Image (spheres, rainbow, N blue to C red):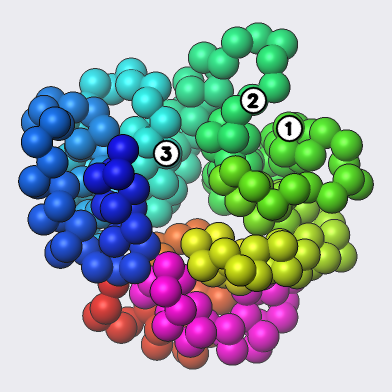
Amino acid sequence: LLSTVAIEFLSRLRRFSEAHALLDRIPELSPDDQWFHAARADLFLSEGRLDETAKELARIPAGSLVDAVVSGRAQLLAWQRQFDSAIAVIERKINSAPPGEPLDEWNKILLMEAAYCHEWAGRPEQAKAIFTRALHEINPSNNAVLAPKGFGMPVYLALTYAGLGEKDKAFQQAHLAIEQYADDGWVKPDAEAALAQIQGRFGDTDAAIAAIPHLLEVPAGTTHVDLRYNPLWDPLRKDPRFQKFCQETKP
């Protein structure tokens, strides 16, 4: 467990060569272990090595429902703009959940991602329906303040409001998440990135782009690779200032 946390920690700090070296030294993992291939795929993806990511994930059974495997496959497919394939991977995972029970944290995030994939694929009505379900799953009380724990769900709540077009709630929730995680060096950068993505979505391009240098410098922050491939940054993609960040060679 400590080794897996250390690998994720090194990856978030953009210390990819050290993360690869540590992964290769873990004695308890078999070369056939799904987590092993998922972790290696995640490192490749973070470095922008999409072809190698796909090859690593192909070593895992196609029907795998392991959280890290499903998340990695969905992210890769979204970055490759294969939105329908990403949705299929996510739906298989969500449909495996016990009927009538609330979704776990992984599935809540995946549900929100599926909604965005429908939007990016040009299906706004389906996207809206799934965003609405995601909102109910993430925050059943709707207007209640979501506790800052677990997987950083307040950040995903802000992105869900944005998906629904609820501008004021999205901005309010994004700022709240930054405050809630003010002392959390792991989740706060995600909250700050979400705010910039929301600003871009609702047309505040200057503010979104002004935030990027900080996001690229802060530990566990955004990477040039994420800017290059993540569809959540698409509203900024035609701006020459944003394109310059994407052209940087650093991960």
Dominant secondary structure, magenta = helix
Q: Which residue is mark 2?
A: 103
| CB within 8 Å, label 1 to label 2 | yes
Q: Residue furthest right?
A: 143
First along the sequence among labels 3 and 1: 3
Q: Splitting the image into 4 quarters, where does residue 222 fall?
A: bottom left
Q: Residue 159: which numbered mark, if any? A: none
Q: Position of residue 12 (x, y in %)?
A: 36, 62
For marks 3 and 2, give the CA distance. Answer: 15 Å
Q: Is residue 107 above or below residue 54?
A: above
> Which residue is drawn at the image coordinates 34% and 48% (left, top)?
5
**What residue lies at 30% left-to-right and 83% top-to-bottom?**
248
Asked if labels 1 and 3 touch by Cβ distance under 8 angstroms, the answer is no
Q: Residues within 10 Å of mark 3 (few under 14, many from 20)?
A: many
- Between 241 and 181, which is closer to the camera in this rendering? 181
The spot of residue 246 in percent (x, y) is 38, 78
- Region of the chain picked out in magenta, as a range: 195-224
User: In the image, is 102 to the left or to the right of 28?
Assistant: right
Q: Amino acid at mark 3?
A: Ser
Q: Amino acid at mark 2?
A: Leu
Residue 89's spot in the image, x, y percent?
43, 29
Tell me where residue 102 appears, x and y as whole percent. Answer: 69, 22
